Amino acid sequence: MGSGNAAARTDVDAVVIGAGFSGLYMLHKLRDGLGLNVRVFEAGQGVGGVWYWNRYPGARCDSDAFVYCYSFDEQLLQDWTWSGKYPEQPEVLAYLEHVADRFDLLPDITFGTYVTAAEYDDATARWTVTTGAGEVVTAQFLITGIGHLAISKYVPEIPGLDTFAGDWYHTGGWPHEDVDLRGKRVGVIGTGSSGVQSIPVIAEQASHLTVFQRTPQYSVPARHETADEEFWREVKANYGEIWRRAKTSAGGFPWQHNGKRALEVSEQERLATYEALWAEGGIRFAVGSYRDLSYDDAANATVSDFIRDKIRQVVTDPETREKLIPTHPFMSRRPIVDTDYFETYNRDDVTLVDVRGTPIVEITPSGVRTSSAEYELDVLVFATGFDAVTGPYFNIDIRGRDGATLTKNWDAGPRAYLGLQTVDFPNMFMITGPGSTLGNLPNSIETHVEWIADCIDHMRRNGLTCIEATAEAQESWTDEVNTAAEASMFSRADSWVNGANIPGKARAYVFYFGHFGKFRQRCARVAGNGYEGFHLR
Ligand SMILES: Cc1cc2nc3c(=O)[nH]c(=O)nc-3n(C[C@H](O)[C@H](O)[C@H](O)COP(=O)(O)OP(=O)(O)OC[C@H]3O[C@@H](n4cnc5c(N)ncnc54)[C@H](O)[C@@H]3O)c2cc1C
Ligand SMILES: NC(=O)c1ccc[n+]([C@@H]2O[C@H](COP(=O)([O-])OP(=O)(O)OC[C@H]3O[C@@H](n4cnc5c(N)ncnc54)[C@H](OP(=O)(O)O)[C@@H]3O)[C@@H](O)[C@H]2O)c1
């Protein structure tokens, strides 16, 4: 995929950075909906965002595919058929490539081009955007569709990595060609979603797999096989209702809790509820039972204990089993969905090393040395996550009004109004910027993209040239973000959602953990009230 005919235009209405779910839809809305001149810059050589970069073995979506897609085009929904419940990376990438073709988006995207800098000029209310290739483009609007994770891989600084004689990879930058792990001694560091997905598949290929685990994880079995032909017929016949439910739900999925509190029912009823959802598998287990699991410690303990028991039932070796039992509450980190994750530890050719108890000391030419042993490896895989949300922003030299920088404005943690705009950066919109919702991301992305397009339309119709969030609105929203996070399970554990995964990074909640449906309504109300909390001129 190469650059299209966009390359000639240097003064446009909008520059969009990124060609994942966010950038593709933003381009379609602005160009085809509003008739704007748009340039999209994408660092990768193709569309897809995280689905372009994350090609590690076992990579899949863990939002159910029937809602891990765009909802904006009914015919697209009817024409596209997913192969199963949680498709693998090549299929999600193929879907996004299909969308790009179908809506003829490629001509306006410049691939293989990293945006290095963007500077705002108050006199003209325009942005000057510079790319790594030296191209300079001006635009009234700068729109970041740079995602939370794609471009900011985190490789911990472990002494000796440069001496390692074997190959090493980060899951988020997996090579495009096949990596042959057959007959190799492989080590995986990290057991987040990427580790949990890749470990069973790597174990199938490697002669021996050593997993270096710092924090044990909860994970729910995916049960891909439950999405059969009848399931897909039902989905396609009911998409209207499915999206209505998803868009009014707490997390962007078309399921509700059962309205009850976990401790108001008998233990027998509670266990039966958990068992039924466990048998169904997937993310519904997390959102489809009791209403108070995500904010009440005692209620949460019932589901956390349930999963701990499930882990104990699967893993046969007593020592390995106990190392795998998480102590933090379920849902205090983003839930994980797996295929045969815990089962993999029953294999003779898989070793689990607890690096909380015996930390990694160094990487040697022949492997990894912990405080208690040395592990010989041919290949090392870093499933160590990302400098999430702020990382992709700090990688660009963005200068707002009077030279304001994000690195300075966000040094104590990112601040933004509704995740859409941040003070001092007029005419810059962020798609799912800090303080927006997590949950099922395509829904969050569509909410923001449609809001931004409507806002730009409003500005053009009313002869307005500039929009910026007010400091009061931003502060008040940041307070709401913090209050919602403190009330949720996410305040009970360290992870990338509060910046704790990166040494030295400011501790701050980067998402709004309130109700997604209400967040959508809030965004709509703000627009309906004449863009409350924004200054327009
Ligand atoms: C392996 C993996 C699986 C996931 N599965 C799910 C899931 O099942 N459900 C869910 O809801 N979410 C999931 N996510 C989260 C995922 O980030 C979102 O679902 C969604 O793909 C985000 O789309 P986006 O377009 O906003 O960002 P991205 O997909 O991150 O795309 C951003 C793009 O911007 C480009 N870019 C960034 N900076 C620059 C720059 N300076 N110049 C040029 N280009 C730049 C990047 O190259 C990238 O292609 C997953 C994430 C990962 C890593
Ligand atoms: N669809 C999917 O299923 C899917 C797949 C992949 C990614 N994602 C998305 O991407 C997010 C990030 O997932 P991720 O797994 O890539 O990253 P992650 O959740 O941040 O997990 C990183 C892992 O690396 C470990 N780690 C980090 N530094 C380490 C060190 N110095 N020594 C030892 N271990 C170290 C962490 O341990 P600690 O836990 O102790 O910090 C953790 O186990 C997910 O939460 C999800 O939103 C989704």
Image (spheres, rainbow, N blue to C red):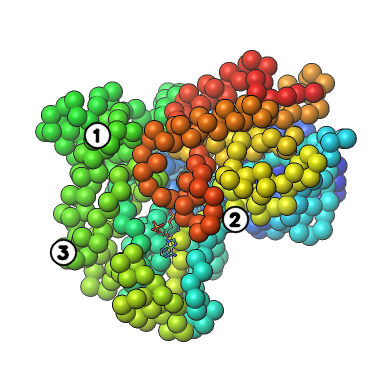
Q: Is residue 213 visible?
A: yes
Q: Which mark is residue 318?
A: 3
Q: Is residue 210 left or right of residue 522?
A: left
Q: Which of disc 3 and disc 1 is earlier in sequence?
A: 1
Which amino acid is tagged 1? Ala
Near mark 2 (Cα within 10 A), the count class, few <14, some 14-19 or many ≥20, is: many
Residue 120 at least partly seen: no
- Is label 2's Cβ within 8 Å of ligand 1? yes
List the residue tagged with mark 2: 151
The tag earlier along the polypeptide, 3 or 2, is 2
Q: Nearer the viewer, residue 290 or 301?
A: 301
- Residue at numbered disc 1: 299
For marks 1 and 3, give the CA distance. 28 Å
The amino acid sitting under disc 3 is Pro
* Badge 3 element: helix
User: Of all residues shown, which one is farthest toward the top?
Assistant: 529
SS type, badge 2: loop
Label 2 sits on what residue type? Ile
The residue depicted at 84 percent of the width and 36 percent of the height is: 122
The answer to whether residue 464 is left or right of residue 207 is right
Q: Residue furthest right?
A: 123
